[in-house]
Image (cartoon, rainbow, N blue to C red):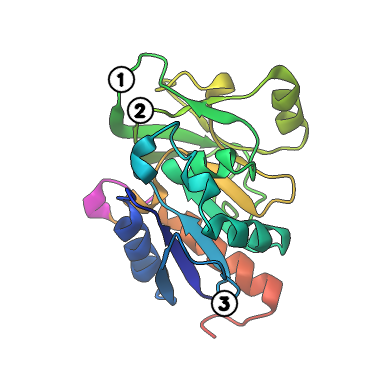
Amino acid sequence: MKYAVLVFPGSNCDVDMYKAVEDCLGEPVEYVWYTRTDLDEFDCILLPGGFSYGDYLRPGAMAGMAPVLEAVRKAADEGKLIMGVCNGFQVLTEARLLPGALRRNDKLKFRCETVELRVENNNTAFTSQYEAGEVIRIPIAHGDGNYYCDEETLNELKANNQIVFRYAGENPNGSVDHIAGVINKAGNVLGMMPHPERAVHEWLGSVDGKRMFTSILQSWREKNGVTHGA
């Protein structure tokens, strides 16, 4: 399975994401610059955190119009797995690959800490190795993580089981319905504010993010009939 880690001007979690794939899975992974227009060789596309284009206009707004996003849309339509974390989540909403929007934190402060998340939907390619309702510890680092959608969209997210993670303890940013991560209707595009790539080693304070990466690999192998380790 081959992974792409997209890199925009201002990305700063691209190395974290790359190392998480390398350390957890040992699978091929490449940095992909934002000007690239062909992602056909990759099976999974990862959009990392940071401050793409310095968060000018809105976080993720300029990156959402970058040339590589057309290739991301094509990959999404083909059913490839796509995960956006923090700024990557913002990019996916700005590109309309996920519903809703990310606003300033309700207390207008940047939050950098480890939080508790509840796994609301473990029936996805990204969460199959978690238990439904399991509480995990994952770091956050954001100033614009306040997920918002209108009531109609929220009801649709609930009806389709598209809410993948909620904040289990304090809501650190004021997100509607404590939402920390959502998935598209097709189930192959996930966005979340917390950073699973920063929770893959004990020395990082938590290994609860590691199962997101192993879930992705297991799902791809099962879908493509690949035997373990092949």
- Is 82 left, or right, of 136 in this rendering? right
Whether residues under marks 1 and 3 lie with C-beta atoms below 8 angstroms apart, the answer is no
Q: Earlier in the sequence, mark 1 or mark 2?
A: 1
In the image, what residue type sits under mark 3? Glu
Q: Earlier in the sequence, mark 1 or mark 3?
A: 3
The span from disc 1 to disc 3 (Cα, nearest Å) is 40 Å
Q: Earlier in the sequence, mark 3 or mark 2?
A: 3
Q: Which residue is mark 1?
A: 109
Which residue corresponds to the image point at 60% horizontal and 54% vertical from the top-left?
128
Q: Which residue is mark 2?
A: 143
Q: Which residue is mark 3?
A: 41
In the image, what residue type sits under mark 2? Gly
Task: Give whichever of 165, 80 is nearer the camera.
Answer: 80
Is the residue marked by circle 3 packed among few (<14), some (14-19), or many (20+) residues within 10 Å?
few
Residue 39 x/y as whole percent? 56, 70
Indicate whether 131 appears above or below 24. above
113 inside magenta stretch = no
Which of the 4 image quadrants contains residue 193?
A: top left
Is the residue marked by circle 2 packed among few (<14), some (14-19), or many (20+) residues within 10 Å?
many
The span from disc 1 to disc 2 (Cα, nearest Å) is 6 Å
Say if residue 47 shows up in the picture.
yes
In the image, what residue type sits under mark 1? Lys
Whether residues under marks 1 and 2 lie with C-beta atoms below 8 angstroms apart, the answer is yes
Residue 26 x/y as whole percent? 39, 75
SS of the residue at dot 2? loop
SS of the residue at dot 3? loop
Residue stretch in magenta: 202-208
**Quarter of the figure that contains the C terminus:** bottom right
Whether residues under marks 3 and 2 lie with C-beta atoms below 8 angstroms apart, the answer is no
